[in-house]
Image (cartoon, helix red, strand yellow):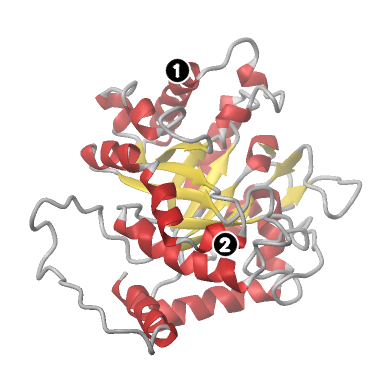
């Protein structure tokens, strides 16, 4: 983490070179005083790729490898990536297909309503030099299919950090997901998450393998503290970390407000503390400026870039170990750091290895 923050500090110094000098007292060692430290992560800033679009980013968008390599050269570490999003709960594993992903859309700017993926999807992810979190389907309520996909991931990926079981479950009822048929509450979801963590973790015979939570609603509802309170030691052994999603939204002016950034991050204080009490990291498994791919008047702006810099440093101070900035449909993504052609480009679709 140190190389990353040295570069961030240098950037801030360059921007503020005409301002008055500011002195900071840096502790000589960690865990001194009353401040509770999160587990140190060597790469606190990463990239989240929408599930169906991941193969396109890796095989059709040349900027992906270039940008991630530049990031590695800058910080000394490959940035962590997470593969997931809404389409992970629309995706079923097909061991028979040789394609990365198979789907049909009416418009190239659309996300598919359903898709399948094969073992080559995991093989592609395994080629990445950094750690990878893979999001799998819980919404379809087909646990055997998800276990099969999880086994394929564990078998292929030496760089696998964790597996998500579902994405933003609070939206399952409105998305018509079968697992939420009937009533669906945070308590019902927590029971589901815990049962799936037990089933998948035991099937894989792997502890510390599940990235739990993955909600987008504002805590405490649908938060980590609420989830942790429902878990016993048997479930907790399978949990690698607790994740939440965060899209502050607003205008360029509100995003650039440091006090606004602090207020936004303080919403997660209780969840962070609950995770640290369990000896687990707390992360933003998916984040960016404005939800839904970003806003044309906000996300692709210099002001949003300044927000990103301030936000990631302030998140680390809040003991949020990693922040994964989401990248959605290629060519239809205002907040993406890069696209098919430079910063923003046309969408590419990958249907095979």
Q: Looking at the picture, tell me which residue is in the foreground, 194 or 59.
A: 194
Residue 253: which disc?
2
Q: Looking at the picture, tell me which residue is in the foreground, 241 or 98.
A: 241
Quadrant of image for the N terminus: bottom left
Report the side of 186 relative to 208 (left or right).
right
Around disc 1, counting alpha carbons within 10 Å, would you say few (fewer than 14), some (14 to 19), or many (20 or more)?
some
Residue annotated with mark 1: 187
Q: Looking at the picture, tell me which residue is in the foreground, 339 or 151.
A: 339
Camera sees residue 129? no
Which badge, 1 or 2, is on the more N-terminal residue?
A: 1
Furthest-top residue in this view: 182
Report the side of 339 relative to 250 (left or right).
right
Residue 39 vertical position relative to residue 14 in the rendered view, above or below: above
Camera sees residue 140? yes
Residue 187 vertical position relative to residue 255 in the rendered view, above or below: above
Report the side of 101 relative to 172 (left or right).
right
Residue 49: quarter of image? bottom right
Residue 299: quarter of image? bottom right
Furthest-front residue in this view: 20
Q: Residue at x 10, y 66 (%)?
A: 29
Q: Classify mark 1: helix, strand or loop.
A: helix
Q: Looking at the picture, tell me which residue is in the foreground, 206 or 68.
A: 68
Q: Residue at x 43, y 81 (%)?
A: 74
Count of numbered circles in the view:
2
| Image location (x, y in percent) of residue 344 | 74, 70
Residue 339 vertical position relative to residue 255 in the rendered view, above or below: below
Around disc 2, counting alpha carbons within 10 Å, would you say few (fewer than 14), some (14 to 19), or many (20 or more)?
few
| Image location (x, y in percent) of residue 235 | 33, 27
| Image location (x, y in percent) of residue 273 | 26, 40
Distance from the alpha carbon under mark 1 to that under mark 2:
37 Å
Q: Mark 1 against mark 2, which lies toward the viewer?
A: 2
């Amino acid at each position: 983490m140190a190389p990353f923050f040295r570069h961030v500090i240098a950037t801030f110094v360059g921007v503020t070179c005409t301002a008055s000098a500011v002195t900071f007292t840096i502790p000589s060692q960690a865990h001194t005083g009353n401040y509770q430290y999160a587990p140190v992560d060597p790469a606190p800033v990463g990239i989240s790729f929408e599930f169906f679009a991941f193969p396109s980013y890796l095989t059709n968008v040349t900027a992906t490898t270039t940008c991630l390599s530049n990031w590695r050269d800058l910080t000394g570490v490959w940035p962590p990536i997470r593969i997931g999003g809404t389409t992970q709960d629309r995706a079923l594993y097909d061991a028979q297909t040789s394609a990365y992903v198979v789907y049909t859309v009416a418009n190239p700017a659309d996300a598919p309503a359903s898709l399948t993926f094969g073992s080559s999807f995991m093989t592609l992810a395994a080629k990445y030099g950094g750690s990878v979190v893979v999001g799998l389907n819980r919404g379809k309520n087909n646990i055997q299919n998800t276990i099969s996909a999880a086994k394929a991931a564990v078998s292929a990926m030496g760089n696998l950090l964790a597996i998500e079981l579902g994405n933003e479950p609070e939206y399952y009822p409105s998305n018509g997901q079968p697992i939420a048929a009937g009533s669906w509450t945070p308590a019902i979801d927590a029971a589901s998450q815990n049962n799936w963590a037990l089933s998948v973790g035991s099937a894989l015979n792997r502890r510390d393998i599940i990235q739990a939570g993955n909600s987008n609603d504002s805590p405490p509802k649908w938060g980590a503290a609420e989830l942790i309170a429902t878990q016993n030691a048997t479930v907790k052994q399978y949990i690698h970390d607790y994740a939440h999603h965060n899209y502050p939204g607003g205008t360029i002016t509100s995003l650039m407000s440091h006090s606004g950034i602090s207020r936004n991050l303080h919403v997660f204080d209780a969840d962070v503390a609950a995770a640290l009490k369990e000896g687990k990291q707390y992360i933003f498994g998916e984040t960016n400026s404005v939800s839904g791919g970003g806003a044309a008047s906000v996300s692709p702006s210099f002001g949003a870039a300044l927000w990103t810099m301030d936000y990631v440093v302030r998140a680390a101070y809040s003991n949020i170990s990693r922040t994964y900035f989401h990248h959605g449909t290629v060519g239809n993504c205002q907040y993406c750091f890069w696209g098919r052609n430079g910063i923003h480009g046309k969408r590419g679709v990958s249907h095979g290895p």
